[in-house]
Amino acid sequence: MNKTNSTNEVSAGLDPLEAVRKELAKGNIEVHKNVRAWPQISMDVSTQEVYSTDDLIGDSTNIIARVAKEYERIVNFPSSTAYLHGLGAISCAMLRKFTWKTRLMSGTTGLMIVTSQPPSSGKSGLNNKYTGPYSTEIDRLNTESYKQRVKIKKKIKQAKDELDEASNDNQIDMLVDKITKLNEDLRNVVSYCKLITNPTAEGLERDAKEGGGFYNFISDEDGGLNTLLGLAYGGGNSHSNLDTVLQAWNGDYIGVARSGREGYRGTITGAISVIAQERAVRTMFEASTRGVGFTERFLMWCEKDRLGTREFEDIHIPWSKDVNLLIPALIHNIMKEKPTELKVSDEAQTYMVDIKNHYEKMCAPGKTCAVPVLRGFAMKVETHVYKIASVLHVCDQLS
């Protein structure tokens, strides 16, 4: 069969890949040069839903795994989804306290995660299990720091009043140095912003400015994700400035200048954990077509829901006493820690070299990860691994 006949077979309705496969089986290698014999690449080749099926927990017994399994027992909620959302939520609590470091690089522990489940599946109950204790800790820490901030601000005001009355250069220099030192002390007194559930990119920037360069976005609805991506306004055609996410993934510098407001300039560090409706993951992949590297910073998971298959023994099934207090205790222990740098072992770094080499080959043209979004994620696999490992390590050490 020559190339023309092969093309005729395709146009007659034979699957293009099958036509090529038949030709290759006959040894007619030249057929691969016939572009018309190959199907068009599409981001959406099927209307069928494709679900994540791997078990992320396995035989793990860490705190997040135990909570995920317990929530599965109580409401028959997919445990891998619960596990991944929990990892993201705990990374939010760790954001100010922990970083990681290898021989050549360092980074933040904040994860960016989007998972999907439909309404009434139990998303809110799971989300509240993490956001409740985290909000309680934020309130406690802000109450403790408020007194310190008030005292320092009063000293700054007194020094400024004295500066207004100062008459000689020595006195002026002394007061300027004092005010500079007090302002530095004020910056070092942590003020936590409340959790964000529905931010614009500009809103994240503002919270970072007010919160010392940090923000956390945890939600159980996709409205916040749509707002962040600019899909909730401008008729869904608006493009949000995503630098506040791109730069925040690993604590990079951002310098924002706007004519109508004062922008934030400094390092920005963020963590995101959104468990939303089924469309959320698809929305993330649609965002990848903009080609700005947004999607590959996220871990995404779309597990099949269990609606219509659940059977309840009781309307209110209680949490096991030993599991119920695990998350509040863990978050409290994390947020009372002093800033800590986690050092990656030489053995782990050697292992990651093998992993990077493996994925590097898969990113060559025509290979599995040659598609831009997969290539981008594969090139960031090392940082993803170190972030996840940091969260799991802290869970083990502070439980």
Image (cartoon, grey):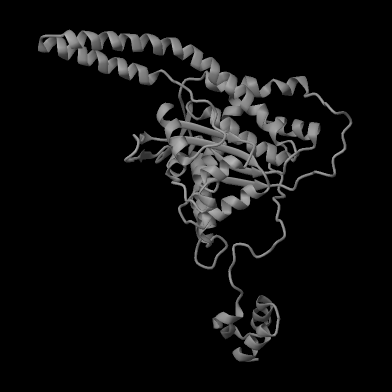
Residue 362 falls in image quadrant: bottom right
Does residue 206 appear to the left or right of 231 in the view shown? left
The quadrant holding residue 223 is: top right
From the viewer's perspective, is 74 left or right of 388? right
In the picture, measured across the screen, residue 194 lies left or right of residue 254, that is right
Front-most of 58 and 149? 149
- Residue 330: where, in percent of width, then height? 61, 22
In the rendered image, residue 49, in percent from the top left (x then y), is placed at 71, 56
Q: Which residue is drawn at 57% across and 54% down?
A: 285
Q: Which residue lies furthest to the front in this view?
A: 235
Identify which residue, 237 or 58, lies in the foreground: 237
392 in relation to 231, above or below? above
Report x, y in % for residue 212.
41, 27
Residue occupying image coordinates x 54% and y 56%: 374
Name the image quarter holding the N terminus. Answer: bottom right
Does 93 sit above or below residue 354? above
Residue 236 visible in rendering:
yes
